[in-house]
Image (cartoon, rainbow, N blue to C red):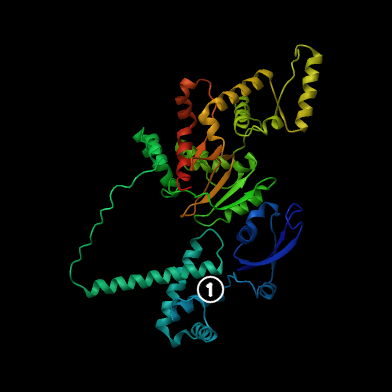
Amino acid sequence: MKYFKATIITTVDHENGKTTSHIYLASETKIAAKKLASQHIFETDGANCCFYKSPRLEEISVEEYLANTEKQTDITEEQEIDQFCALLTIFGIQEEYDEGEMRDADDLLANPSEEPELFEEYTKLRDEVTSEITASDKAISLNEIKKLAISIEEGVQKERLFTQSTELSTESVVMPVENVGEVEKSVTDVALDELVNNCTEEKELINSVINNIDDNSIFSAFPPVNGKIISGEGIALEMLNGCVDALKPTESLIVRHLANSTYHAANGYSSTQIRLVQKSGLGALDWYKKAPIQGEKTRALLIGDAVHTAILEPELFPLRYVSAPELDLRTKDGKKILSDFEKKNLTLARLVLKKEEFEAIQLMRDSALAYPLVAELLENGEPELSIFYRTEKGTLLKIRPDWLGLYSGVPFILDVKTTDDVHDFGKSVDKFGYHLQAAFMVRKLNRF
């Protein structure tokens, strides 16, 4: 076990201004300790975690650690873990223990030969708890160890009761089968079933891919989007990863105004990665994260982004895009004026579009918004929410719907796509995996 002093620093944008504080941690590795520090920030001030710098860790002596942790509750010292497990075996399931019981536990640990059967029972429980902790890929607090030990001990007790009852009775037992009837499916489930069941082979392939990743957890119930909501403006990637890594099973985190590049670089499996696995296998995931990417987007992608902004974030469109002036680019003066114009707008973080591109985007926007249903769908919702969720089995997932809204009280996802030929859009769906993306998002939000 190693011991660390973590320095927690807030930025000037925090509601309390720039502050510095310290917490003391016990962990096997520095990386695990850093995760604990990030988890501490997320749990104590999750709404403002983007205003924290990455925790700085300094390894310290056990004496300094003990001197500063007298009042801390989440201490993972070996003695305390042993003590708690001993208490379970001696006194059963309790949350609090008096001083006499604590002394009895100490006596058991110090003199195991006096009560060998009890100590053997304790040792077995201790080994099971240790095995579970070792199998976990994250640091675990004392309170979590308590819950784990209780669940293991209760499971053992139930197993004993079941064994006793079956040994006492020699009569056969017929278990009644309850007729629960057919479960009514939601509108989204029916639509999704129609989408996925169009091709049996494709459905089987998707399921096999998902099974390989996490035993069907990918398409299990979603993340209710009910976790903490934070602002992602200016948040560093390392800090964001600290927040999402701290999520416990079934917990979610919603990040508003997060840069697209930061979302894609953040930890978690996205629908893009699921589609990659479908095509190239699990080994492609490691390559995906390490391979270099093209620095600049293609023109088609840039136009797609502009259409997306024009329809879903119209107030931001003039801040991000501008039309190039009409110029004769065959002349030296025309080229010089355009170059200066592009440089000026670059400093304003605005992309210069060709005049015909700018006009086409405006027409696409106006055409979409002129359709009554689209206009109504965009009345109540928010664009580009980044949602992170850890499944019950520990897999970290992420989605970023173009638009997450409510229509007549029902949550829905709206995704903006551009195409060369609307009559041939089906080929684009198959080529770019839009159907998988839709299934991934809808399944994740089906318990919103």
- The residue lying toward the viewer, choosing from 314 and 361, is 314
Q: Please give the name of the residue rendered at 79% of the width and 12% of the height, measured from the top-left corner.
A: 331
Q: Pick whichever, 403 or 336, lies toward us.
A: 403
Q: Position of residue 353 (x, y in %)?
A: 69, 23
- Where is residue 375 drawn, in percent x and y? 55, 31
Give the residue drawn at x 43%, y 86%.
Answer: 115
Q: Is residue 363 above or below residue 17?
A: above
Q: Position of residue 222 (x, y in %)?
A: 47, 48
Q: Is residue 167 above or below residue 220?
A: below
Q: Which amino acid type is marked by label 1? A: Ile
The count of marks equals 1
Q: Secondary structure at mark 1?
A: helix
Residue matched to label 1: 81
Observer-nearest of 150 and 283: 150
Q: Closest to the observer: 154 or 16?
A: 16
Answer whether residue 244 is visible to the viewer in this image. yes
- Residue 274: x %, y % from top left: 48, 40
Q: Quadrant of residue 141?
A: bottom right
Where is the N terminus found, in terms of image quarters? bottom right
Identify the residue at horizontal 55%, vertical 85% (top origin). 99
Which quarter of the figure has residue 194? top left
Quarter of image, res 21: bottom right
Q: Is residue 259 above or below residue 242?
A: above
Q: Is residue 311 above or below residue 443?
A: above
Q: Does residue 195 appear left or right of residue 302 in this picture? A: left
Residue at the farthest left position: 171
